[in-house]
Amino acid sequence: QKEVEQDPGPLSVPEGAIVSLNCTYSNSAFQYFMWYRQYSRKGPELLMYTYSSGNKEDGRFTAQVDKSSKYISLFIRDSQPSDSATYLCAMSARNNFNKFYFGSGTKLNVKP
Amino acid sequence: DAGITQSPRHKVTETGTPVTLRCHQTENHRYMYWYRQDPGHGLRLIHYSYGVKDTDKGEVSDGYSVSRSKTEDFLLTLESATSSQTSVYFCAISEMGAEINQPQHFGDGTRLSIL
């Protein structure tokens, strides 16, 4: 069983839709949760970074962590064609600088 | 954007030849990492460094070596390249905060093809 599970998609939505991207994990020691956006032929770009449970909002993006269910989500409001990319979740345990666990990524396509 | 430069950006080489990829950072971060990204496998850690001359293996380190002689540079070497090492290679950097972990930031990758 992988430490982090993420549906690969692809997920196709119309412009303006609310997008929900999700990851589940098995290690209860994870406390740091990240979402990265990766455009084709580019490196992953950090979108959101949260610690422990709760919500964090940044513009059209909201990251949600439910540690009791070992489930994290990224919501994108008013999705745009420029949001079309692969989204990777990542997580790590406290003081474990050498180990970040990545999901395999969900490919999102926002249609104009 | 995090100041991370990977070189070369693209390389095609033949089986059995040595290959060195370079990662250069301007952020003075202590930790540097090499990943490979392949379809169906996501990002897999090859080696990482926690300081000058301090390195350790990741989950897919066989066939790879690394060196870090300066804070800003982290080199990945394929001693004798094989076709299974055809991949996209990413360098990442991070810092350890006083209280909490800091996230990794990535370069734009090196696309390596071994024929």
Image (spheres, coloured by chain):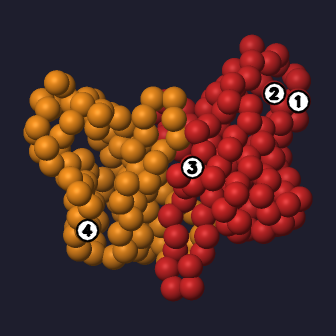
Q: Earlier in the sequence, mark 3 or mark 1?
A: 1
Q: Which chain carries label 3?
A: B
Q: The red chain is which one?
A: B
What kind of element bears circle 3? strand
Total number of numbered discs in the rendering: 4
| Foreground disc of the pair 1, 4 | 4
Q: Is the residue under label 2 in contact with that under label 1 (CB below 8 Å)?
A: yes
Residue where numbered disc 3 is placed: B106
Q: Which chain carries label 1?
A: B
What kind of element bears circle 2? loop
Which residue type does callout 3 highlight? Answer: Phe
Position of the C terminus of chain B, as image quadrant, is: top right
Which residue type does callout 4 highlight? Answer: Lys
Establish whether labels 1 and 2 are both on one chain: yes
Mark 1–mark 2 distance (CA, rounded to whole Å): 6 Å
Residue where numbered disc 2 is placed: B81
Establish whether labels 2 and 3 are both on one chain: yes
Q: Seen from this angle, which residue lies furthest bottom?
A: B99
Chain A appears in which tint? orange
On the question of residue A68 being in view, the answer is: no
Q: In this view, does A27 lie to the left or right of A75?
A: right
Establish whether labels 1 and 4 are both on one chain: no
Residue where numbered disc 1 is placed: B18
What kind of element bears circle 1? loop
Of residue A5 and residue B68, the one placed in the foreground of this image is B68
List x then y, in percent, for residue B36: 62, 40
Residue where numbered disc 4 is placed: A56
Q: Which chain carries label 4?
A: A
Q: Is residue A1 left or right of residue B10?
A: left
